[in-house]
Structures are given as structure tokens and as C-alpha cells.
Amino acid sequence: GAGVSQSPSNKVTEKGKDVELRCDPISGHTALYWYRQSLGQGLEFLIYFQGNSAPDKSGLPSDRFSAERTGGSVSTLTIQRTQQEDSAVYLCASSLKGRAYNEQFFGPGTRLTVL
Amino acid sequence: DAKTTQPTSMDCAEGRAANLPCNHSTISGNEYVYWYRQIHSQGPQYIIHGLKNNETNEMASLIITEDRKSSTLILPHATLRDTAVYYCIVRPILQETSGSRLTFGEGTQLTVNP
């Protein structure tokens, strides 16, 4: 079956530009997570969506980062006025529900490079 | 989340069992032990999880000590494709917010040699 997909797979942008990263979760999964992984670092939680509940934005590093999830399915992570330190792989994951016993399925990630 | 400690790197010969240890001495009774791995340039992949009992699936076995302060992931017949960073993670059973996010540490770089 179809897994989590993300687009684009690679994005190169100039400092100060805005970027949008897309995530298509597995159909029927109500929980969706965004993480990022900087070069040589572990994964860092960014934001979590569960159904129609208010998202948990506690991991967003600055107010330049925002995300939305439309219709409980597709999610878009937006980074405004990108900085070089935003360069990282941005990973999306979904799970059936947001429970600890629900495994998270990860997409292949979007590699963002800010010049 | 409870902190986990893993060796930075390990080597294993192809076809042999790979035993990856993890210490989680501060784990509480309401936390699962999860294992994920990340092959280079790919997203993390779920392997297995457990609470108290040992678990086995088609990928691996998870052995959790009786006091739950440590665990071992066993890949019974390692192949070259098992070369990856392996993450041991503890997650609360119930987490009202953030949906039980995964908190990744440094993990263990497993290299399977021919």
C-alpha cells in the first residue's frame, strides 16, 4: 500500500525566501508529525496534528515556521524568510492515532538547502 | 521522556546475529521501549516495540530485562542492508498532548561487514 509521501524531495532556496513543504500521510491515519534532521544530528520534533484538535506546536523553533493540515489529510510546513540554519531534512510521519502503541511511518523527507 | 544510552557504533559480520544494547535505567512503568532504524538518506523505519515481555517479529527480537532498565535488539541474521543507525526510544503510554512524539537520541551506527 501507499506510504507517506513528501514533496519536493529536494529544495534549494535563497536566504530570505519562503518555502512550502508538503506531506501526504497514509490514508486513514489521524496523527501527523513533522520532524527535522540537521546534518549529523538526531531528529527534532517540530509539530503534531491529531484529527481536529489544535496542533501541538511546541517544537517549532521560531515564528517563521508554521504548518497546517487541511481536511485532516495533507499537511504543509511553511518556513518564511529562510535562514541558512534552516537547512536540514524535514521528515513527516503519520500514525493511525497519536497513541504510544501506534507506530509512526515516516516519509522519505525533503532535503532543504538554504544558500 | 526517559533518557536512553546506546553505544555509538558497532560492527557485525554478515550472517551473524547483531545484538544492540540500550540502557534506559530511568524508565517508568508506563513507558514503552521502541526501536527504529534509519538507513542512510531514508526516513526512520519502525522495527519493534515492547513494554515488559520479550517481543519478536519478522525483523527482529526485543529482549527486555526483568527490571526494564535495559533492552537488547537482536537481528538474528544480519545482512548488508541492515547497515543503519538504530535508535532506542522510550515513549509514555499515555500522553495527552503531542501524541507521543518520538524523541531520538544519537543511536548506534551498525555496520554489517561482508
Image (tube, rainbow, N blue to C red):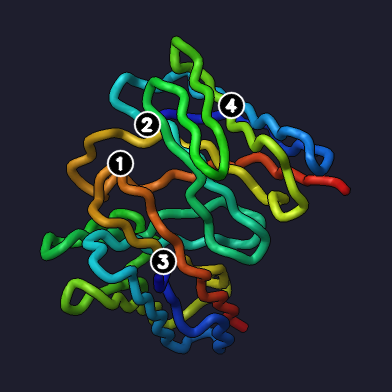
Quadrant of residue B29 within the rendered picture: top left
Contact between marks 2 and 1 (CB within 8 A): the answer is: yes
* Protein chain holding label 1: A
Q: CA distance from mark 3 to mark 1?
A: 17 Å
The residue tagged 3 is: A92
Chain label for disc 2:
B
Label 2 crowd bin: few (<14), some (14–19), many (20+), radius 10 Å = many
Q: Which residue is mark 2?
A: B32
In the image, B21: left or right of A105?
right
Label 2 residue SS: strand
Q: Residue furthest right?
A: B114
- In this picture, is A72 found above or below B6? below
Q: Residue furthest front?
A: B58
Task: State left or right for residue A84 relative to residue A21.
Answer: right
Q: Residue B17, located in which quarter of the rendered image?
A: top right
In the image, is residue A8 above or below residue A66?
Answer: below
* Residue that mark 1 sits on: A100
Q: Are marks 3 and 4 on the same chain?
A: no
First of labels 3, 1 by sequence position: 3
Distance from disc 3 to disc 4, alpha carbons, whole Å, reads 28 Å
